[in-house]
């Protein structure tokens, strides 16, 4: 199934995964705009 999808529409593999809570992590954005959180114990 994956091989068939890759032959028919290779762009689908570049945007994978599709059915997870978080799609793809944007590594560049994560480095440039870190979302740092902490709380006092």
Image (spheres, grey):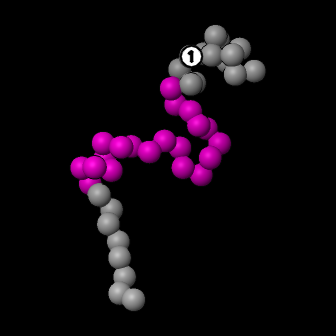
Q: Relative to 35, does residue 16 appear above or below in the rendering?
A: above
Residue 16 location, x and y as percent? 56, 33
Residue indicated by mark 1? 10
Would residue 1 appear left or right of 34 to someone viewing this image? Answer: right
Question: Residue 19 magenta-drawn?
Answer: yes
Question: Where's the C terminus, which quadrant?
Answer: bottom left
User: Considering the numbered disc 1 on the image, is that residue within a helix, a strand or a loop?
Assistant: loop
Q: Main secondary structure of the magenta part?
A: loop
Q: Relative to 1, does residue 17 appear above or below in the rendering?
A: below
Residue 6 location, x and y as percent? 63, 16
Instruction: Find residue 25 and report its image quarter.
Output: top left
Question: Where's the N terminus, which quadrant?
Answer: top right
Residue 7 location, x and y as percent? 64, 10
Residue 26 location, x and y as percent? 39, 43
Q: Residue at x 24, y 49 (%)?
A: 32
Crowdedness near tag 1: few (<14), some (14–19) or many (≥20) residues, C-alpha within 10 Å: few
Q: Residue at x 65, y 11 (%)?
A: 8
Q: Give the residues drawn in magenta, as a range.
A: 14-33
Would residue 30 appear left or right of 5 to someone viewing this image? Answer: left
Q: Relative to 38, does residue 10 appear above or below in the rendering?
A: above
Q: Residue at x 56, y 16 (%)?
A: 10
Choose between 16 and 41: the one closer to the eye: 41
């Amino acid at each position: 199934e994956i091989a068939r999808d890759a032959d028919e529409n290779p762009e689908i593999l570049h945007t994978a995964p599709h059915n997870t809570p978080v799609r793809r992590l944007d590594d560049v954005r994560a480095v440039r705009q870190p979302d740092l959180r902490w709380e006092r114990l």
